[in-house]
Amino acid sequence: MVPEQSFHKGISSCMLSSMPEEFYDRVEKGSIILKKAPKFSFCKEDIVVEGEATPLETDLVILATGFKGR
């Protein structure tokens, strides 16, 4: 199983990803929450996600666009 592109091309075009240890375990346990929403906004201490009844209290927000490199 040999990749068609070089490592440099793969990493620079977002074709490869890396997750920290226990990432999926933490998602299953609920300490990491994944949300997909077309709109959101920040307020003083929370984030308001479209479709959610109440704001979410967060320590960290990571935004991802779903960009597919070539």
Image (cartoon, helix red, strand yellow):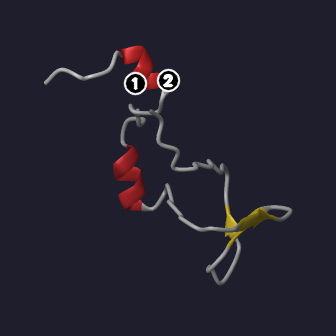
Residue annotated with mark 1: 10
Q: In the image, is residue 49 above or below residue 28?
A: below
Q: Residues within 10 Å of mark 1 (few under 14, many from 20)?
A: some
Q: In the image, is residue 70 above or below residue 38?
A: above
Q: In the rendered image, which quarter contains the N terminus? A: top left
Residue at image coords 51%, 49%: 66
Residue at image coords 65%, 84%: 53
Residue 43: x and y in percent read 83, 65
Q: In the image, is residue 20 above or below residue 12?
A: below
| CA–CA distance in space, label 2 to label 1 | 6 Å
The answer to whether any part of residue 54 appears in the image is yes
Residue annotated with mark 2: 12
Q: In the rendered image, which quarter contains the C terminus? A: top left
Q: Residues within 10 Å of mark 2 (few under 14, many from 20)?
A: few
**Viewer-side residue, 31 vs 64:** 64
Which numbered marker is on residue 21?
none
Q: Is the Cβ of the residue at disc 2 closer than 8 Å to that at disc 1?
A: yes
Residue 5: x and y in percent read 32, 20
Q: Amino acid at mark 1?
A: Gly
Check the image and name the residue furthest to the right: 44
Residue at image coords 43%, 20%: 9
Residue 2: x and y in percent read 18, 20
**Viewer-side residue, 5 vs 38:** 5
The answer to whether any part of residue 47 appears in the image is no
**Viewer-side residue, 1 vs 18:** 1
**Viewer-side residue, 60 vs 35:** 35
Q: Amino acid at mark 2?
A: Ser
Q: Is 37 on the left-hand or right-hand side of 20? A: right
Q: Is 29 on the left-hand or right-hand side of 46? A: left
